[in-house]
Amino acid sequence: MPVELVTYVVQNLVAEPGALEVRAEHDDRGVRIDIRCAEGDAGRVIGRGGRVINSLRTLARAAADGRQRVEVNLIE
């Protein structure tokens, strides 16, 4: 569920949704969500002072409902 939420939000943030790639890796500790986007869209995903990426992390953790650990990373 957190992966779908992050994908939906990021698709609506970026200018080039076709270049967006969101991958999730599950392990015994939780889920790691990696976001790759076009170079020009990285600033939109990060936001001023990191506000957008931090909000994405908060949303993903809330969607997991405390059942698993969630980590969200922007891969450049």
Image (spheres, rainbow, N blue to C red):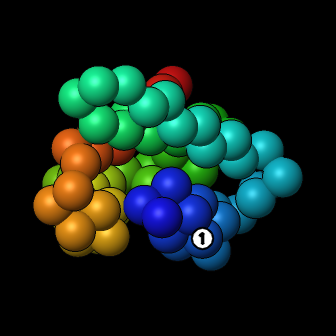
26 vs 63: above or below: above
Camera-side residue of 28 and 40 = 28
Q: Is residue 10 visible?
A: no
24 vs 7: above or below: above
Question: In the image, is 4 to the left or to the right of 26?
Answer: right
Camera-side residue of 29 and 55 = 29
The structure residue drawn at horizontal position 78% and vertical position 44%, both measured from the top left corner, is: 19
Camera-side residue of 60 and 52 = 60
The structure residue drawn at horizontal position 57% and vertical position 63%, both measured from the top left corner, is: 4
The structure residue drawn at horizontal position 60% and vertical position 70%, both measured from the top left corner, is: 8
Residue topped by disc 1? 8
The amino acid type, in three-letter code, at marker 1 is Tyr
Q: Residue 7's spot in the image, x, y percent? A: 58, 60
63 vs 24: above or below: below
Q: Is residue 12 visible?
A: yes
**Which secondary structure lies at badge 1?**
helix
The structure residue drawn at horizontal position 32% and vertical position 70%, both measured from the top left corner, is: 63
Camera-side residue of 75 and 61 = 61
Question: In the image, is 66 to the left or to the right of 35?
Answer: left
Q: Residue 55's spot in the image, x, y percent? A: 25, 66
Q: Residue 31's spot in the image, x, y percent? A: 36, 38
Question: In the image, is 57 to the left or to the right of 41?
Answer: left
Question: In the image, is 11 to the left or to the right of 31?
Answer: right
